[in-house]
Amino acid sequence: MSTWRDERNRATLARLRRALPAIFPAPVLAHALSRPLVPATPRRAIESYWRAHPLRADQLARALAGLGQAPDGWEWRLGPEGRSTSFRAPPAPFREKAYALGPGHCCVCGQPVFRLGWHRDLWGDGKPNRNAGWHSACVAAWRFWNDPSQQVQALKKRQARRCAQSGRRLLKSSEVDHRVPLFRVWRERGEHRWPAILAYWGAPNLQVINRDAHVAKCAAEAGARAGRSQSAYSPVLEA
């Protein structure tokens, strides 16, 4: 197996180096060369980099969205035509047909997409990639927002493997939780504006807690949904 991997990596490394543009993000290349199986193309190297750094992708995607604002006339609604089908999905105005910016712009953050799905024009030609509709970082962020439990290890590491509720050591049964429940974000949507609202799906609103703490928190949230006191859940997030 090791012989096969070595031979495969020699071939793919040669292919990667032939395809590399003169300017290429150094951290991405370093990451690619450290993989057990080296990515064969620059685009795959970039995709691998963002998959390995979901929290960084989340932060970047929200920062890119923050460079703009929601389109005139848009409001967060549920339904067909590209809208969210559930309040648990992050609002994405540029994914809706009526507000789509078209090829060359990211459907998540609305900013131009450059070569290889990169978010900055490293090559200085000022030309968005007309064949792209996503930043590679925004792809990783979108997956993270919709299924944060897949990144439980990264979130545990951020918390030094301590339960965010009790401060005790996280157990194997620990679970990812939204500090401010998403039903509250939907209920109070009129008080929040896109793109700042994306923080409720991102790392600022995510925590890993032990299962017993999660069960107790869910019970309290169920009471809140039934119209009881909601004072324990302030929607204020850190930047």
Image (tube, helix red, strand yellow):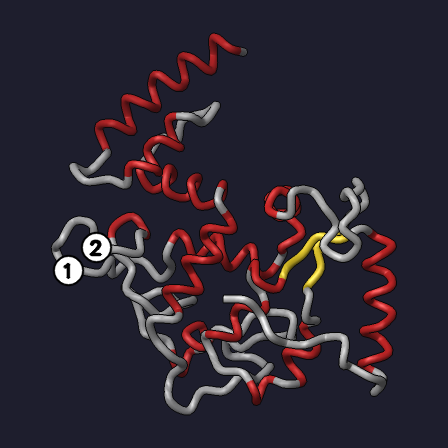
Q: Are marks 2 and 1 in contact (CB under 8 Å)?
A: yes
Count of numbered labels shown in the rendering: 2
Which of 102/181 is in front? 181
Q: Which mark is residue 219?
A: none
Residue that lies at the very extreme toward the front in this rendered image: 167
Quadrant assignment, res 94: bottom left
Other-residue count near label 1 (Cα within 10 Å), few / some / many at <14 / 14–19 / ≥20: few
Residue that lies at the very extreme toward the bottom in this rendered image: 73
Residue 173 x, y percent position in the rendering: 81, 45
Q: Is residue 82 left or right of residue 169?
A: left
Residue appearing at x 79%, y 40% in the figure: 172
Q: Is residue 17 above or below residue 198?
A: above
Of the 4 image quadrants, the one containing the N terminus is top right
Residue appearing at x 20%, y 50% in the figure: 122
Residue that lies at the very extreme toward the top in this rendered image: 3
Residue matched to label 2: 121
Between disc 2 and disc 1, whose residue precedes?
2
Residue 200 x, y percent position in the rendering: 58, 69
Residue 4 x, y percent position in the rendering: 47, 12
Other-residue count near label 2 (Cα within 10 Å), few / some / many at <14 / 14–19 / ≥20: some
Provide the secondary structure element on which disc 2 rests.
Answer: loop
Q: Is residue 95 above or below residue 134?
A: below
Q: Is residue 151 left or right of residue 104?
A: right
Residue 113 x, y percent position in the rendering: 29, 59
Amino acid found under the numbered disc labelled 2: Asp
Provide the secondary structure element on which disc 1 rests.
Answer: loop
As measured in the structure, the alpha-carbon distance from the residue carrying label 2 to the one carrying label 1 is 6 Å
Residue that lies at the very extreme toward the left in this rendered image: 125
Residue appearing at x 64%, y 78% in the figure: 185
Amino acid found under the numbered disc labelled 1: Gly
Residue matched to label 1: 126
